[in-house]
Amino acid sequence: ATELGPLLCRVDPVPELAFPKLRVTAKRLVPLPPGSAEEIDIADRGEELEPAEWAQRLRQLAAGEPGRLLDVRNSYEWELGRFEGAERPELEYFNTTTPEALGLRSEDKDQPVLIYCTGGIRCEFFGAVLRQRGFKHVLRLRGGIQHYGNTEGGDLWEGRLFVFDRRN
């Protein structure tokens, strides 16, 4: 992985074009979940944990420390693979992801909420939604599952990772 300022960039060389018909268009970041305010402060999205810190937090959860481990992907992605102890999301589409849909309650607002996704993009947005809704300790996996797997290997991961392209 390469650092580009605050961005984490990884180059995965492949022998052929990964996106043979790549087209870039400007769109909204992601569709807002129902009940979200029109404006989300994306700068306030919780704390980002490096993969080694993430693994340490997962071990602490497994040892009984308080907190919730939430997969922000859909249920199909969860079925294929997940971190040990992650709760199954009953979701088909990201734009239906709300704190309530993931089983979060008002009493969860004071405990750590660890969220992860494939590459970190969904967590960037959903972390901001959680912070806007009053969750105080939102912890996101930097670079998502992919960055974790490339740095920590399969430790604490069960199954395989679903990606829609040829990323490693």
Image: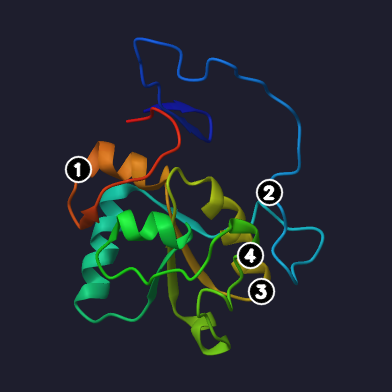
Q: Which amino acid does label 4 sit on?
A: Thr
Q: Indicate the colouring scheme.
A: rainbow
Q: Which residue is drawn at 52% across and 54% down?
A: 123
Q: Which of marks 4 and 1 is nearer the N terminus?
A: 4
Q: Position of residue 5 (x, y in %)?
A: 53, 29
Q: Is residue 106 left or right of residue 32?
A: left
Q: Where is residue 95 in the image (x, y as percent from the top left)?
A: 65, 59
Label 4, residues with CA under 10 Å away: few <14, some 14-19, many ≥20: some
Asked if marks 4 and 3 touch (Cβ < 8 Å), the reply is: no
Q: Say which of 84 and 132 sits in front.
A: 84
Q: Say which of 104 and 4 sits in front.
A: 104
**Number of on-image labels:** 4
**CA separation in Å, label 1 and label 3:** 33 Å
Q: Which of marks 2 and 4 is nearer the N terminus?
A: 2
Q: Residue at x 19, y 77 (%)?
A: 63
**Which element is circle 4 on?**
helix
Task: Classify 107 as above or below 153.
Answer: below
Q: Mark 1 points at which residue?
A: 153
Looking at this rendering, what residue extends furthest in the bottom direction? Answer: 107
Q: Earlier in the sequence, mark 4 or mark 3?
A: 4
Q: Name the residue under label 2.
A: 30
Q: Mark 4 points at which residue?
A: 96
Task: Indicate which label's residue lies in the foreground, 4 or 1.
Answer: 4
**Which element is circle 3 on?**
loop
